[in-house]
Amino acid sequence: MSDALADRLAAGGRMTRDEAADLWRRGDDDALRAAAMAVRGRYHRPDEATWLIMAIVNYTNVCVAKCDYCAFYKLPKQEGAYLLSFEQLSERIQGVIDVGATLVGFNGGFHPEVRLTDYATLFERVNARFGHQIETYSLTVAELMYACKVSKTSYLDGARMLGDAGVRWITGGGAEVLDDAFRRRHSPLKYKVEDYYDCQAAILSAGLGSTATMVIGFDESLDERLNHLERLRVFQDSVGGALPSFLCWTYKPWNTELGGAEVSAHEYLRWLALSRAFLDNIPHVRTSVLTRNEGALRGLAWGADDFDLPCEDEVTQKAGATISLDFEALLDVARAEGFRPIHRGPWPVRATG
Ligand code: SF4
């Protein structure tokens, strides 16, 4: 890292895209970590990290998007396709509450027969039964986009309908790499990048919260990855910093049409650091225990400040992720890295509407 960039980051300034590309290509690990920790230090104490226990409960595996990197989906009439009833979903939710989850995300796929009104009814019932025990993330931006499409409803009206049913968060999941060339190669039926951000802006203006995510390790180029970060930073500026967090995880190649190999732990840590340094307008950078297991906790020294201890996620488990319920052992890893793990509650919703 050049002295000029180090001084600028220390003074609260911003890294350019060219500097990010240069740091990625030529910067050694110390330089990447220094850049990341300089930006992390604007928001967080250097020796603290926050955590909670989270589950992703999949309400359906039916999806017509057919992304080639996905090991989870089934087509509507395919053997093994399911759509959980409210009672079945409740059983799963109770199961993860019993092991300590305080945050539960509901993710599925692009189900052609489920309408926005069905989601609104479902989440209203879920919140009535479990809202006093857990915070919920209901759907991702990508799922909402599709639900609005099949319901012939605008993104804003769709988000408002869910908000009226008590939904508080629609996360920035389903983003993978937000670059149109990447999307054409691997998931042409899912969405276009412009459309994704239109929907996320609508979610925020409807008074709901959202988050930012990224997945690396497919066949994306550095340019495509930087397009993702750059566009996200511009979006976050445009919504006044409404997204509280950025979570990056890694593609799991097992049982997918795309196949390939998983990125190394070292590359993940380097990308986490670069993301932390570049996304200077997002307060929290989260490291992914779900896809990197205890190795993710090394990410706290590479710019991350928050993590969840996962207890269920069928999507990544089908593609090769493994989950440990020995939460205390995982927290000990964070302590051994020099961090005081602090259990946290849900973050407040920051919307633009
Ligand atoms: S990644 Fe999501 S949208 Fe793509 S096929 Fe899988 S479930 Fe469907």
Image (cartoon, rainbow, N blue to C red):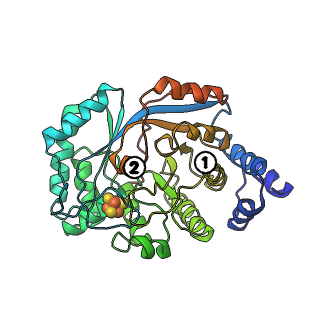
- Residue under label 1, please give it: 265
Measured as percent of width and height from the top left, residue 60 is found at 23, 52
Placement of 21 over or under 272, stated as above or below? below
Does the image show residue 298?
yes
Say left or right for 40 vs 350: right
Measured as percent of width and height from the top left, residue 96 is found at 30, 32
Q: How many marks?
A: 2
Marks 2/1: CA–CA distance:
17 Å
Say left or right for 13 vs 183: right
Q: Residue at x 43, y 76 (%)?
A: 184
Say left or right for 75 vs 223: left
Measured as percent of width and height from the top left, residue 230 is found at 59, 65
Quadrant for the C terminus in the image: bottom left
Say left or right for 204 vs 45: left
Q: Quadrant of ligand 1?
A: bottom left
Q: Is mark 1 within 8 Å of ligand 1?
A: no
Which amino acid type is shown beneath numbered disc 1? Ala
Which amino acid type is shown beneath numbered disc 2? Thr
Quarter location, residue 17: bottom right
In this view, the residue in front, 351 or 79, is 79
Placement of 216 over or under 313, stated as above or below? below
Measured as percent of width and height from the top left, residue 349 is found at 41, 43
Q: Residue at x 51, y 47 (%)?
A: 245
- Residue under label 2, please give it: 316
